Amino acid sequence: MSLIDPHVTDPRYTKRGAVYVPAGEGETSWVFADTYTLKVGAQETNGSLTFLEATVPPEGGPGPHVHNDHDEAFYVISGELEFLNGDETVTAGAGGFFFVPRGTRHRFRNRGHHAVKMIFFFTPGGIEELILAGGTPAEPGVAPPIRELSIAAPPTELMERYATELLPDPGPGPGPGPGR
């Protein structure tokens, strides 16, 4: 029987390193008409993860693209999003989860009449620089600008650094796969 309390000598009991971001905090930007809040990025996670929350208005969402060096995952909190998975579309409602392995063409689009709330993340981290590059710092209490018909692509240097490519959109019609 040991006389030394393991809680005192075992560093697992006292080591700290967790990251906490309270509700309503994080760098918030308007990216096109969407509102993204960076909750944690590569700097805070030692490069492991980029985690964002988003509000996507009707017809909001990025065009088709592929991340060749990052996996991406989405969790829909409220509303419904149409996701592109290669050459098929999948509709995910509240509670739906969508994982995109690196190298897969994808996009999401809000085809509904109300804003969608979701969270999404990337592994590894760091890609937040690209995601927020085309954005504008959000102004508290102000709605994001209306999506313009012509949207500029992120800077080529960042697209190359994060091995991301813009790809053609199959259009607004139903995709050949299930879920649509």
Image (cartoon, rainbow, N blue to C red):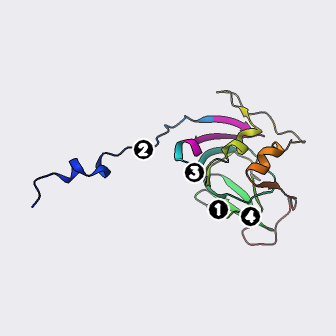
Query: Label 2 to label 3, Cα distance in Å?
Result: 15 Å
Q: In the rendered image, is residue 59 in sight?
A: no
**Label located before the other in sequence (2 or 3):** 2
Outermost residue toward the bottom in this view: 177
Residue at the spot of label 3: 49
What amino acid type should be assigned to the residue bearing mark 3? Leu
Instruction: Name the residue rendered at 21%, 47% in the picture.
Output: 8
Tell me how far mark 1 sits from mark 4, CA to CA.
15 Å
- Outermost residue to the right: 150
Which type of secondary structure does the marked residue at label 2 adopt?
A: loop
Viewer-nearest of labels 1 and 2? 2
Specify few, some or many for label 3: CA neighbours under 10 Å numbering under 14, 14-19, or 20 or more.
Answer: many
Which one is earlier in the sequence, the residue at label 3 or at label 1? 3
**Residue type (three-letter) at the residue carrying disc 4:** Gly
* Between discs 3 and 4, the one toward the N terminus: 3
Helix, strand or loop at disc 3?
loop
Residue 180 image point, x, y percent: 76, 67
The numbered mark at residue 98 is 1
Contact? badges 1 and 2 (CB < 8 Å): no
Question: Of label 4 and label 2, which has the lower sequence position?
Answer: 2
Of 112 and 167, which appears nearest the observer? 167
